[in-house]
Image: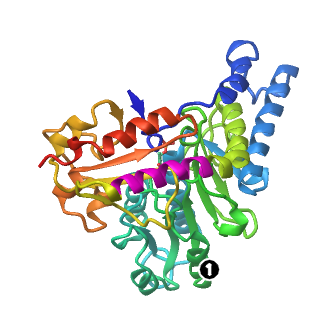
Amino acid sequence: MIYLDNQASTPCDPRVLEAMAPFWQRLYGNPHSIEHGRGQVLAGRVEEARGQLAQAIGADPREVVFTSGATEANNLAIKGAALFAQRHAKSKGRGNGPARCKILTFASEHKCVLESVKATVAWGFDPVILPVKTDGLIDWQAFEAALDDSVMLVSVMAVNNETGVIQPIADIAEKVHAVGAKLHCDAAQALGKIPLDVALLDVDLMSLSAHKAYGPMGIGALYVRRRPRMRLEPLVSGGNQERGLRSGTLPLPLVVGFGVAAQLAAEEQATDAERIKAWQDACLDRIAQSPALMQINGSLTQRVAHNLNISFLNLDRDAMLRAWCSFAVSSGSACSAADVEPSYVLTNMGLSPAQAAASLRISFGRQTQQSEVDHLLALLASPAMERA
Ligand SMILES: *Cc1c(COP(=O)(O)O)cnc(C)c1O
């Protein structure tokens, strides 16, 4: 099985595993038990990891809140901002609803962002799901038309998990801040893939996930800007860990692993991207030369090197799945082949449900080998891609 599903999850880097090992084996204990020496050592190691992560994204360590993953970070960012605004904003003639009542997001966002935005209805907000264009980039006209001083928060992903399309976060930030709103960015797919600096991007909140960047599963983080201060209401109550924003004992081995993974992501992003871009280019060449009808989904210029999203225009879904059975690639659906729910990311970019169902996401990783790419190139040129 050739693993080309790195946008679903990346393997742990061996250097990350090595850094975590002592904390599973010998250095047990609670990093919050700072009344004894062991606890203090562990607390120091947590702060070291927080520093590594902060440095990787150009943040202050005090701006990093560890969570269980990007799903939780996105929930905390969106629901936490909405709850805080609802509790603290003075109402302006809208009953008890917040003065800035709109939360904007886009149709190609991850489910956990879309569902979190929709959930804010409960606190008096109007969720607005804006369209993306056929190339997967945001519809700038619709965005500007929706943006005014009734907007509290905008949530846009840095890199799309299905198409690898990169949104222009810094340009979006300028517009969002011009109307006094805040910007949240789901950067789960961006860490290690593109340069990521919170000051350059000018975001107020940014979500990360370790297992999308060669770190362990079960940990992520939310960047929460200090200047100007981004205020959130916590969603989890308890012992007030993480500055009261996320109670619960920190999973020390995972924290340590995430710190190392983030450091490696920053250090190796450029060299990883250069190597992987050559593979993407080789695949695009092969697809262009193929007599079979294949369509690449998503912008070719605003895209990470790690992703190819292909629609097979003369294969049905079953033929496509048979041809690709020795590759671990994503077919955009968690359901069985008989009960297909086509990707909403692709249908919202204008693909028909049948086209979306006959599409695959191929995602390369740091551990991908040239020999594996050679198998991929051979398949792309094979008659199996042409069968009607
Ligand atoms: C994977 C992913 C998430 C969810 O992250 P978890 O850490 O698995 O909860 C959110 N957003 C995007 C864009 C992702 O790719």
Residue 153 at x, y = what percent? 52, 70
- Tell me the residue that label 1 is attached to: 174
Q: Which of 340 and 274 is in front in this view?
A: 274
Q: Does the residue labelled 1 lie within 8 Å of ligand 1?
A: no
- Residue 246 among those drawn in magenta: no
Q: Can you name the residue that lies furthest to the top here?
A: 26
State left or right for residue 275 relative to residue 119. Answer: right
Q: Give the range drawn in magenta.
A: 273-287
Q: In this view, does 142 lie above or below 234?
A: below
Q: Disc 1 residue type?
A: Glu
Q: Can residue 35 be seen in this view?
A: yes
Magenta region includes residue 284: yes
Q: Where is residue 46 in the image (x, y as percent from the top left)?
A: 76, 35
* Labels in figure, total: 1
Could you tell me residue 139's position as x and y percent?
Answer: 40, 77
Q: Nearer the viewer, residue 142 or 388?
A: 388
In-image side of 387 versus 219 (left or right): left
Name the residue rendered at 52%, 54% in the picture: 305
